[in-house]
Amino acid sequence: MNFAAQIFYANHMLDGSPKQVGLGDNEESDPFWKSQEERLNTRKLRSSTNDGHCGKKGPVSNGAVGSQSAPMCPERLKDFGAEEYLNGNVTVLETKVAKAPEVQRMSSPVRPKEKCGNPCPPTNSAPPEFLTFEKINMAAFKIQSGVPRTPCTYSRLSKQYGMEIFMKKEHLNYTGSVKERGALHLLLSLASEQQRKGVIVATDCNFSLAIAHHATELRIPVFVIMPANSSQSRLHMYRDYGAMVISYGSTAHDSQRHAHYLANENGYMCLEEDDSAEYLAGLGTVGMDIYEQVPKLDAVIIPACGICGLLASTAVAIKHLNPSISVIGVEPEEFPVLHQSLKTDSPIQDLYGNHNRKLYKGKHVYVIHHSMGTDTFLLAKKFVNKVVTIREDDALVAMLRFQEYERSMVDIEGALGVAAVTAELLPELKGKRVAIVTSSSNMELDLVRHCVDRALFLDNRVSRFTVLVGEWPGEMAKLLDMLAREDVRLLDICQRRYNEGADVFKTQVECVVETRDKAQNCQLRQTLSERYPTLCWLDR
């Protein structure tokens, strides 16, 4: 079709004539206005200048030659670019026209791009918060069947120290430690494939006990690597929980290295007490329990040993529920990790102290070689109101007070919160409602005996003194009669006849006595000093 024929046909159609005009005598020709929907049976083609054009040999319909003309309404002319023909903007094309597959290939990349445009997060989005109350709440739902809620009861220490004290007794858990909450949630967060392979822990501590117990309950293979010099009672405890115990090395460092080796060789996951979000979320559930169990609470006192995970996570929960509640952390004076970190405004990496390693059991291993994480430090800095340090002597006396008033035994870490009250380091809490977390009670019997004896000396209820008495008959009886009149209990007595510097006719007697309280002890000292000028009280 030449240009004149195209103009004639366009004018004829715009006049509204329904008559169809042929384009020639060629029977193979097909009307150029045939829609793409009729040719491809897929979709309409709107406002395209490249569809429906004719080549030199006649109209071509997208690669297929038509055999019969089709009627067309005048109002559809715009869809086929009639205005461009009228204005003279005509593009002469060859017989090659864009085919349907090519149209699909051009449009297909656009659809996925539009679909994934909205859900994809921007590259400059802020990272999620490390530990939130929502994570702690979810952890509480997961572990509620594995870790029962411990009591938070009113303490008889309240009247003695002038405040309402409530003891959150986490030491009553099955393994005797609050670490069960974090350990269980950590195990539940492992992938199913890793749970099938198993986990491995090293050193003898509360975290390892919790992992051994709950891994067995979840039917996860668990291996415990312990030094060869560990006590047999602890070995039996792990085996009773269901763990496979392996004795290796002479120190905790040897056990840890061997645990990492076995984990790499056999595909186990070596679990260590760290500041992961899963572990801290489980520990933070203590704060939710305290808030529900003690209404109108003013302050919470929490031990801060090792990585300070219990303190930081509990503070997150407490401050979310009621920001006006004060959160106070307590840690040993011999190893003030958090206290020094807050002073330097950064987590301490290397801090070595002279703390009693036997008394703190395996805690020193984690404190020294697994320093406080940055995330835990930032949480403690943001949510903890105050941190105090406790002397070892005050902690031992607090253990004694707790045993007498609560009829239960806690270890040195569990007594830190009580020590902050008994040592009267928090005078601002007078008349307030205070909750104290007693976190653990894992202590061997021989160590318990030593701690109690030491605490009685520190509390002025057991005293040791020496006097010089004559060797003639009746002098020893007079001393014993005086002790009986003072109503004191004689625990031990030792006579030394050959004492350098002593009188020839006198002997040195060393006595260990027990008194009811400090007042009776003062009375005994005064009476003995009046009767025996050579009286010497031995240091505690």
Image: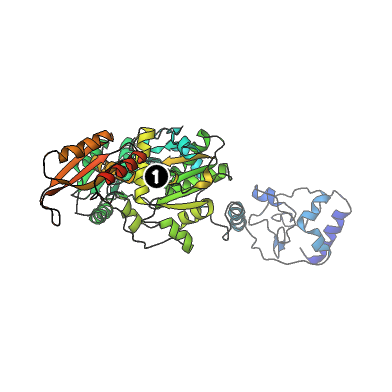
On the image, the x and y values in percent for residue 208 come to 31, 45
Residue 256 appears left or right of 139: left
Residue 171 appears left or right of 58: left
Evaluate whether residue 13 shows in this view: yes
Relative to the observer, which residue lies in front, 481 or 340? 481
Which residue is painted at 36% across and 61% down in the image?
351
- The part of the image, by quadrant, that contains residue 103 is bottom right
Which residue is painted at 15% across and 44% down in the image?
494
**What sort of colour scheme is used for the picture?**
rainbow
Identify the secondary structure beneath mark 1.
helix
Which residue is painted at 41% across and 32% down in the image?
148
Residue 353 appears left or right of 425: left
Mark 1, Cα crowd under 10 Å, few <14 / some 14-19 / many 20+, is many
Relative to the observer, which residue lies in front, 381 or 261? 381
On the image, the x and y values in percent for residue 193 come to 35, 44
Mark 1: amino acid: Leu
Q: Quadrant of the N terminus?
A: bottom right
Task: Pick out the residue farthest to the right.
Answer: 15
In the rendered picture of this protein, how many numbered marks are placed on residues? Answer: 1
Residue 377 appears left or right of 89: left
On the image, the x and y values in percent for residue 223 come to 26, 45
On the image, the x and y values in percent for residue 305 come to 39, 50
Would you name the residue on which mark 1 appears?
Answer: 186
Evaluate whether residue 128 shows in this view: no
Relative to the observer, which residue lies in front, 141 or 343? 343
